[in-house]
Image (cartoon, grey):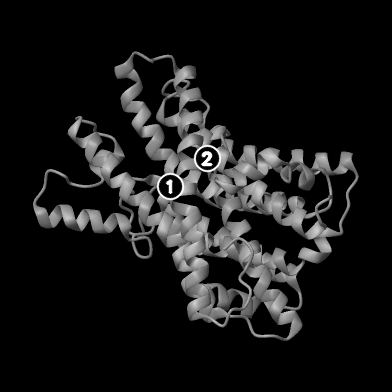
Amino acid sequence: MTASPKTERIHALDGLRGVACVAVLLLHVATMLELWGESGPYPLIPGTPAVVVFFVLSGVVLSIAPLARLREGRPYDWLGYYPRRVVRLGLPLVAAVAIGVVAGFVAWTLGSTGRSATAIDFGGTAPQVVHDVLMQFDVLFFVSDDTVTLFGDPLVRVNSPVWSMGWELWFSLTLPLAVALLARVRRDVPAALLIFAGVFLSYWSGYFPLRLCLTFWLGVLLAKHLGELSRVRLTAPIELLALVLLLSVIELVQAASAGMLGALGSLLAAAFPTLMVAACMGVVTLAMTDGLVRRALSARPVRFLGAVSFSLYLTHAVTIGALEALLPRLGVVEPLVQAALAVALSLAVAVVFWHVVEKPGIALSRRVGDALGTRASQPSGE
């Protein structure tokens, strides 16, 4: 039986999340294992744009149901949403950080000086160790842009991808505000331009929380037009051309950010990544239309990647780090072999994590939401 347009559309968004997660995986495999030596073309692997896609997707998926309720004139079950969402994100997150703490301790005992081994002062006093461990579980206030904290200090996490979960949680907690404001906006193009102005200001000033929060709001704007976009049917050549152009813009910005295009002035240095955010939004938009991209992202193998993407995102860095330390001791030193093993094992660990942690967490989050809420339908993807 052919999937309904609505079902296929959601599958496509899940599939896009899976593809984006693979991009992050490949970036970390290449950089952590130094696949091409110390100065390879690592900046061209679109890991950062993939996280932007994550944020836009979250904005879309989480706001679909609340916006639908508003259109119907019915209240949304926010009382059930909050505990459901916190448990949905929190349980896998806590498990992943705990695994990272254990892995960091093992790495420290083996003499590693990597970030996971030094994020916690395992050789310090008991209060210092406990302080550092608790900091690892703090995703609301110990925030960063994957490089530095709010105060300019280097990011120190035993499981580095966890940095983005803080912003996912902040958006989840402020979703009612985003929906309430953007649902009442009559002219979405000026609203989008205003959001992009905020993103530009964030890059220009260096105040990263502004752009990281606003990126989710772009997804809410897209969710307002989900029905319209799903009926847009581009010809195959135009759709492929649009996809190539969007990906080319993303790669151009990646190259510019890495200094491959020479020195940039402050305005241009802010304009380029703002353009990248727009291109990432464009990729999500393309996945929402009725065409080849949506159907490709709805294919079963891609949907599998989407299903385990959260688990893969939370566990892959620890898995790669373990192999980075273990494989040379086993005599496996060929970079391509190491990379292939890292990809395969990361996927395997993600599947196990999905079954052991994430899937039970989803069931628990629904029970908690039903118990504390009014049993209204939850947003797809929670």
Q: Which x, y percent locates residue 41?
A: 53, 27
- Residue at x 62% of width, y 43% of height: 304
The percent coordinates of residue 114 (x first, y second) are 29, 35
Q: In the drawing, does residue 155 fall left or right of residue 214?
A: left
Q: Looking at numbered disc 2 in the image, what kind of residue is underneath it? A: Val
Tell me if mark 1 has few (under 14), some (14-19) or many (20+) residues whose alpha carbon lies within 10 angstroms of its own: many
The residue that label 2 is drawn on is: 24
Looking at the picture, how far across and down is residue 34, in whole percent? Answer: 42, 24
Q: Amino acid at mark 1?
A: Pro
* Horizontal and vertical percent position of residue 79: 51, 81
In the picture, residue 118 is in which quadrant?
A: top left
In the image, what residue occupies the spot 28% across and 46% down?
101
Can the viewer see residue 332?
A: yes
Residue sitting at 83 percent across and 64 percent down?
228
Whether label 2 touches label 1, CB < 8 Å? yes
Out of 40 and 203, give the one closest to the viewer.
Answer: 40
Q: Between 380 and 126, which is closer to the camera in this rendering? A: 380
* Residue closest to the eye, 376 or 149: 376
Q: Which residue is mark 1?
A: 161
Residue farthest to the left, as pictured: 125
